[in-house]
Image (cartoon, grey):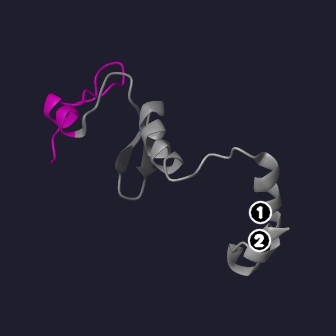
Amino acid sequence: MKTVVTLGSKGQLTVPAAVREALHLERGDRFEISIDEAAGALTLTLIPGIEALRRRISGYAALTEPVTDVDACYHAHRRRGPGGRIDESSLQS
């Protein structure tokens, strides 16, 4: 989607409603601006808010088993061999 916007007297650009809706933009969203001086181009990149980051991280957290015995976890990780694999025989002791 391409659209034309005009720079206002206070140096502000208004993002058209169709663009805001397509990208699910909300008031207070933050952007990083990259400048390509040779091309005379600006690139706006949406900076994810804390809720978006929380959703991404929660997917990873669901994949891990919680640690209930810190000592056992510590010893198990110290006994990892080549390739990050745990030496099962060392857990018997």
Q: Magenta: predominant secondary structure element? A: loop
Residue 44 bears which disc, if any?
A: none
* Residue range of the region highlighted in magenta in the rendering: 1-22
Q: Position of residue 33 (x, y in %)?
A: 43, 42
Q: Give the residue furthest to the top.
A: 10
Q: Could you tell me which residue is drawn at 43 percent across and 49 percent down? A: 35
Residue 34 visible in image: yes
Q: Which residue is mark 1?
A: 77
The C terminus appears in which quarter of the rendering? bottom right
**Residue drawn at the location 24% of the way across and 39% of the way down:** 23
Direction right: furthest residue: 93
Residue 86 in the image: above or below residue 15 = below
Tell whether label 1 touches label 2 (CB within 8 Å): yes
x, y percent for residue 39: 35, 57
| Badge 1 amino acid | His
Which image quarter: residue 48? top left
Helix, strand or loop status at disc 1: helix
SS at mark 2? loop
Q: Which residue is mark 2?
A: 80
Whether residue 93 is in magenta: the answer is no
Q: Residue at x 13, y 34 (%)?
A: 18
Q: Quadrant of residue 20?
A: top left
Q: Is 5 placed above or below 81 here?
A: above
